[in-house]
Image (spheres, rainbow, N blue to C red):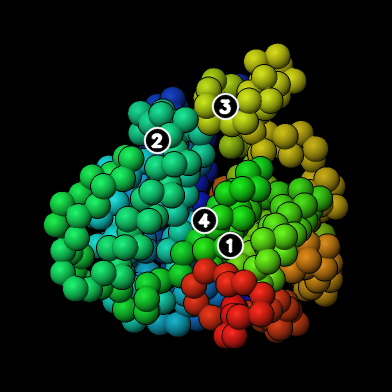
């Protein structure tokens, strides 16, 4: 199993809760203090350098017009980490491919980072959470198709080495595509996508040999999705995907005592508590399934995933493995239990920092996880034997 450290670079200095309705889209930037922000950026980057030293990989993401994530350009911290880290895989999860004005620019940037890091890039592409559509002025009914067309174009740009080609898609029209540099990894960096409830998207991801990731998902739903993908592959006559085609991100806190871990997870939980958004931004028409949007209009659906699990409280989080916390021994036990219940996954993205946690507190959490937890679970999960799409069962050298 591979392990990733993750922080959202979230702005912790929010007004009192009763003074704002959303941390996304409409919170005035006057709330941001550049001096404190500069300290936050550098502190978070220092966490990733420590992660590399501890044997953890690094994951960064990107969001726009929000206090919940100050990474408005994921490529910036990714570029820094490509140079400042030495061994860690560096994952961007991800590039908002559905909203990219120019996927070829993304292909060029990712190829550069893959070279600078000597082939340590893991490249994620995402549809984007619904709030992003307002920042990008995107059409929610088009995002899924745009995502897959962008991935197709970027893959072709990375793997075409005989000179320029033209591309005519539904959304993208490109002349004389000839990306320099080509990626360091052959045929290109591993590709990831994320998802929530769309099984067909998850199946498409894994069938193409990509890694599918889910965030903060209760274990029953997580297990159903992973099982659904495996069953679909079986029904299609495909090889069973290895565990490293599946990834999960929980909140993680490791303490020397249960009390220390409990206090720490409540600080990590800050991210969920303060991830507020107004109803009209949570489910724009065309973004979610028709039945879910009907629930939203009728009042039965009151928010997104983080809103729903926020109301359940910390015990719900622990029971459902959305939050994994405790002494090292207990954390090992919880991860093994989660791995068994889901049928297996190969990547654990640990969110170990949020809110006003300073570097020393976060570093202790990371160090306990790396030194006292990872050695006992790193052998979990099967690994793909071959890069590329899944093949039919019975074919030699299959993944």
Q: Residues within 10 Å of mark 4 (few under 14, many from 20)?
A: many
Please tell me whether residue 10 is drawn above or below residue 18 in the rendered image: below
Who comes first in sequence, dot 2 or dot 1?
2
Q: Which residue is mark 4?
A: 193
Query: Of circles 2 and 1, which is in front?
Result: 1
Residue 76 lies, in percent from the top left, at: 32, 58
Q: Nearer the viewer, mark 3 or mark 1?
A: 1
Image quadrant for the N terminus? bottom right
Question: What residue is shown with label 3?
Answer: 283
Mark 4 or mark 2: name the one nearer the start of the chain. 2
Residue 377 on image: x %, y %: 73, 79
Counting residues from the start of the chain, the first of labels 1 and 4 encountered is 4
Q: CA distance from mark 4 to mark 3?
A: 20 Å
Q: Secondary structure at mark 4?
A: strand
From the image, tell me which residue sits under label 1: 206
Distance between the alpha carbons at the discs numbered 1 and 4? 9 Å
Query: Which residue is rendered at x = 47% and y = 30% of the image?
Result: 141
Mark 3–mark 2 Cα distance, whole angstroms, equals 17 Å
Q: Residues within 10 Å of mark 2 (few under 14, many from 20)?
A: many
Tell me: 238 left or right of 41: right
* Alpha carbons under labels 2 and 1: distance apart: 31 Å
Instruction: Check disc 3: other Cα within 10 Å, few if <14, some if 14-19, many if 20+.
Output: many
Give the residue at x 26% y 69%. 160
Looking at the image, do the residues carrying marks 4 and 2 touch, with CB atoms under 8 Å apart? no
Tell me the residue that label 2 is attached to. Answer: 65
Residue 170 in sight here: yes
Q: Give coordinates of residue 393: x percent, y percent.
A: 66, 75
Q: Are marks 2 and 1 in contact (CB under 8 Å)?
A: no
Indicate whether 263 appears above or below 310.
Answer: below
Question: For the residues carrying marks 4 and 2, which lies nearer the camera in this image?
Answer: 4
């Amino acid at each position: 199993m591979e392990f990733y450290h993750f922080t959202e670079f979230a702005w912790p200095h929010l007004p009192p809760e009763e003074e704002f309705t959303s941390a996304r889209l409409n919170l005035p930037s006057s709330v941001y203090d550049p001096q404190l922000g500069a300290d936050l950026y550098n502190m978070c980057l220092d966490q990733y350098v420590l992660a590399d030293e501890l044997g953890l990989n690094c994951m960064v993401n990107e969001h726009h017009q929000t206090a919940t994530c100050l990474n408005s350009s994921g490529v910036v911290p990714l570029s820094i980490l490509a140079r400042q880290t030495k061994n860690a895989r560096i994952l961007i999860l991800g590039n908002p491919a559905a909203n990219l004005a120019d996927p070829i620019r993304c292909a060029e940037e990712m190829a550069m980072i893959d070279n600078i890091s000597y082939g340590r890039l893991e490249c994620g592409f995402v549809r984007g959470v619904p709030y992003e559509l307002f920042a990008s002025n995107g059409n929610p009914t088009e995002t899924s198709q745009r995502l897959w067309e962008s991935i197709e174009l970027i893959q072709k740009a990375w793997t075409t080495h005989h000179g320029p080609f033209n591309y005519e898609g539904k959304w993208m029209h490109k002349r004389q595509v000839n990306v320099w540099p080509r990626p360091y990894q052959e045929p290109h960096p591993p590709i990831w996508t994320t998802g929530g409830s769309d099984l067909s998207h998850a199946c498409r991801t894994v069938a193409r040999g990509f890694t599918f990731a889910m965030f903060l998902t209760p274990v029953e739903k997580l297990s159903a999705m992973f099982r659904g993908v495996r069953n679909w592959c079986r029904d299609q006559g495909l090889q069973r995907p290895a565990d490293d085609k599946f990834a999960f991100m929980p909140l993680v806190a490791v303490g020397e005592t249960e009390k220390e871990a409990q206090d720490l997870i409540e600080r990590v939980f800050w991210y969920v508590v303060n991830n507020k958004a107004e109803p009209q931004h949570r489910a724009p028409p065309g973004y979610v399934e028709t039945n879910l949007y009907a629930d939203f209009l009728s009042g039965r659906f009151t928010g997104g995933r983080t809103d729903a699990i926020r109301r359940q409280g910390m015990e719900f989080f622990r029971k459902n493995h959305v939050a994994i916390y405790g002494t090292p021994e207990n954390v090992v036990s919880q991860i093994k239990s989660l791995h068994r219940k889901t049928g297996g996954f190969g990547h654990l993205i640990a969110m170990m920092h949020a809110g006003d946690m300073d570097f020393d507190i976060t570093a202790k959490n990371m160090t306990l996880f790396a030194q006292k937890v990872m050695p006992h679970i790193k052998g979990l999960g099967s690994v793909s034997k071959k890069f590329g799409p899944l093949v039919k069962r019975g074919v030699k050298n299959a993944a």
